[in-house]
Image: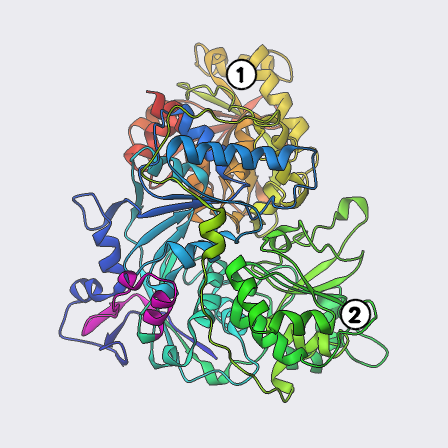
Amino acid sequence: MAEIISSGVYLQNGRQILNESNIPACEAKKNTIAYGILSAHNTSDSENDLKIKFDALASHDITYVGIIQTARASGLKEFPVPYVLTNCHNSLCAVGGTINEDDHMFGLSAAKKYGGIYVPAHQAVIHSFMRETMSGCGKMILGSDSHTRYGALGTMAIGEGGPELVKQLLCKTYDVARPEVICVYLTGAPRPGVGPQDVALELIGAVFASGFVKNKVLEFVGDGIASLPIEYRNGIDVMTTETTCLSSIWETDEETERYFINHGRPEDYKKLAPGSIAYYDGMVKIDLSKVECNIALPSHPSNVYSINELNANADVILKEYGLLDKLGKDGKIHCDQGVIAGCAGGTYDNLCAAADILAGGSIGNGAFALSAYPASQPVYMELIRNGAAANLMASGVTLRTAFCGPCFGAGDVPANGGLSIRHSTRNFPNREGSKPGAGQSASVALMDARSIAATAACGGILTPASSLDVKYTPSAYKFDDTVYKNRLYKGFGSPKPEEELVFGPNIRDWPEFPALSDDLILKVASVILDPVTTTDELIPSGETSSYRSNPEALSEFALSRKDPAYVGRAKAVRALNASRKGEGLDELYSVLKSAGYAEPEKALIGSVVYAVKPGDGSAREQAASCQKVLGGMANIASEYATKRYRSNLINWGMLPFTFDCDENALPFGIDSYIWVPGIKDAVKNAEQSVKAYVLSDGALNEITLSLPALTDDERTIILSGCLINYYRG
């Protein structure tokens, strides 16, 4: 199980842990794998303030239209690096009339015009395709999806909001302070029935709550790696996003080399390992032989229990999570649905193991249903060739094409009140597609494909795969990219500027955004006091996907699951900025003038959201851009859950304030006015705190808002009003 060492440690030859060394930590840090890769991609003169240029980019059909529209408005001429546009989120084209396929046609036309790589719907989920075709030892890849992780293939990959990809498309850089590196030291070998999701949940459960690895790089080493097949490693690696780390990297070996040979890219392999003495800022030790079959209960991947522990204490634990109705009269936990899908679940190895467990059996003809989504057409073809697909189907499993829907609430929505067990990436609230506001609710628990298949074999009764006597028959995977050769558009290096972009009626340009004014008036449009606010709660997934190419239409959904009145309040503030009168402004202006401010009427008026810790989860930039479209100018938070959400705010010209205060004693509430004088100069001068004033009972009450760690470019973007304005000059 997981043991955390919070102090710095030395590692000798990638195996022996040392408490001290004759080599200074500052020098030994340079011997980590991560340090070398980051340095090789750094274009700045500083070892610590990095300006990264990536080897390739990736987006899916929920994000690429907005990214290309932003880059186009900023002067894009052609894609300077390989940019992969996959169609794995809005694949169904079943909602919103022509909207989804219109986006796809826009993507194909953009790939032709600017020289991109276009992967049609149902061919592959984004991360499987990037592993198969674009990864490489020592490379770096940036994706507009939070689960952009290819560390097990020796590739440092980072998931960020769309504007960070725009910067790369415009030949700019990804600016970040050199991150700390945490060693994940693996020993032993997993027991039969224990899969990659079980190990991943063990890691997430150990580190998430403390924030131990937040915005750091996880570097996987240890003799335990040799016991793991490459897809097993990929399955662990993709879930590192849920630890809130920045990126991940693994030492590579002959197993990694075989992967690249099998995928026709032997030149992309090279041996990666720490130097003779490497220093890490901390360590997580995991003995793989002690990891059990795990489950993450709703509504976060860190709510981890072993399945045996849950079964033994079902009445107590299920009551805590509001799932007591899933405990049957027989004393067993009854699940309603199973799904094995996406970049985490839909791998060849996972589905072969599920087929072995279900071989010759049946999932039954009751309420429990199981669906499986091979993560790419090459994987699907090989499952057909080796008979695993037929075995799964014969047992009652429904096989689907490559689709990410179950991960974000756009596929396999269970019945009201249902419990869905899924080998997918997240189980945030409403990720299964329900609508609690309309009286429709369900729950998702994360499990490994093996235990999901074991549960299916037992008719939906929660069962760890380790409890079954199964003969696993591993089948060597042979990658066949014939379908890719026949269906993909590969235009990198051959842009066709004469091509016209294809616009559907739902694809709209970004509205104009004003530059930051000398002073700023903020009106509070929402106050969220939950300990953590996910990206899904800031802008819902699922039903909103069809409107991701229409900024104004999408903004109607902002905070709809957390604060349904937010949109109306934000629009009212936007109207105030246009009219400059009403809604208490006269009183505010009078008080400000009495306090000596000569022309407060010239200040920009914008809305602000307060949340304790916003932005956990997805990289979707729309969590910030929707607020901006509605007239948002800032967030105030105790802290930001992820770097990518804070970056999204900045790139859309919103001030990422922090405020040190007990949320039970906030000096402002909904509809409060906050006057921030001299904000333009404060940003220009890199001031890390600003004085602000809350209007209350005709008086101005002073507060201090923090604005730490903005780079020169970030300050200029905020001053300009957004990234688009910044590049327009």
The picture places residue 232, in percent across and down from the top left corner, at 47, 72
The picture places residue 502, in percent across and down from the top left corner, at 52, 27
Q: CA distance from mark 1 to mark 2?
A: 58 Å
Is the C terminus in the top left, top right, bottom left or bottom right quadrant? top left
Please say whether residue 287 is one of the residues in the magenta stretch.
Answer: no
Kind of element beneath mark 1: helix
Name the residue: 34% across, 67% down: 261
- Residue type marked 2: Lys
Rendering quarter of residue 566: top right
Q: In the rendered view, does 530 fall on the left or right side of 316?
A: left
Numbered circle sitting on residue 326: 2
Q: Is residue 343 above or below residue 113?
A: below
Q: Which residue is mark 1?
A: 591
Badge 2 crowding class, 10 Å Cα cut-off, few under 14, some 14 to 19, many 20 or more, is: many
- Quick one: label 1 or label 2, which is nearer the N terminus? 2
- Residue type marked 1: Val
Kind of element beneath mark 2: helix
Q: Is residue 545 above or below residue 149?
A: above
Q: In the rendered view, does 89 fall on the left or right side of 159?
A: right
Q: Which residues are magenta?
A: 255-282
Camera-side mark, 1 or 2: 2
The picture places residue 287, in percent across and down from the top left corner, at 43, 82
The residue at the far bottom in this view is 469
Numbered circle sitting on residue 160: none
Q: In the rendered view, does 716 fall on the left or right side of 36?
A: right
The residue at the far left in this view is 22
Task: Tell me if residue 464 can be seen.
Answer: no
